[in-house]
Amino acid sequence: MRFTDFLKATVLTSAAAATVLAALTAFAASRADDPLLVPFAAGWWIIAAGIGVVLGRRAETSPPIARLLADARSSQSLPEVSPARVLVNRLWPLLACTVVAGGLAFLFPQVAAIATGFGIIWALSWRRQDAAVTAIEGRDGVRYYVERTSPLKAIKLIRTPGFRSNEVWDMEETTAR
């Protein structure tokens, strides 16, 4: 799976998890008869959105992704492409946290409300990383793929030859599209 596609899928999955948890929070709050839960949850979600927007405002790659790209192993052949396996393999912690927080929502709706905020932060803070990696790929004439590794080990990338672009990559223009 291409790394840029993985980053997009991570953002969308985080946003989906936050949406599901927000819905569960609203449902559980309506049954809990707690008049302060919804206002405090909404306040936390607004604060979380602000934190995510501030963290994700940079047009360049974040330091962890820059290290990941720099440490990528070179290969002349394309790796095995299995997007579903890569997504489950790499995003299982997000899935597990969503399921646990969703299950606890019926006993403690506050848990789902807090977890929703972290999903919002994650989705908004990583929203521009795929465009930054695409710009690097175009500049360097390479493509990055997620290497198949154990779900308990750190993610690793494979760098393959790609097509070098003669365009000047402007990150503000790339992210505006």
Image: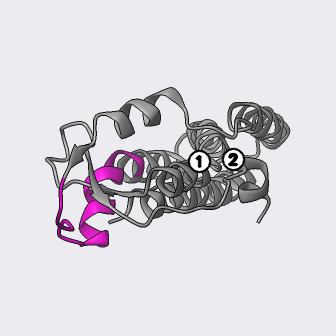
Q: Residues within 10 Å of mark 2 (few under 14, many from 20)?
A: some
Mark 1 is surrounded, within 10 Å at the Cα level, by few (under 14), some (14 to 19) or many (20 or more) other residues, namely many
Up-down: is 171 above or below 56? below
Indicate the secondary structure of the residue bearing disc 1: helix
* Left or right: 35 as drawn, with respect to 17: right
- Among the 4 quarters of the image, the one containing residue 78: bottom left
In x, y percent, where is residue 5?
A: 46, 64
Please tell me which residue is depicted at 45% across the width and 33% down the height of the picture: 66
Q: Are marks 2 and 1 in contact (CB under 8 Å)?
A: no
Tell me the element at label 2: helix
Q: Which of 94 and 4 is in front in this view?
A: 4
Residue named by callout 1:
132
Range of the magenta residues?
A: 75-94
Could you tell me which quadrant the C terminus lies in? bottom right
| Residue appearing at x 62%, y 36% in the figure | 114
- The relative height of residue 39 versus residue 12 in the rendered view (above or below) is above
Q: Which kind of residue does numbered mark 1 sit on?
A: Ala
In the figure, is residue 11 to the left or right of 70? Answer: right
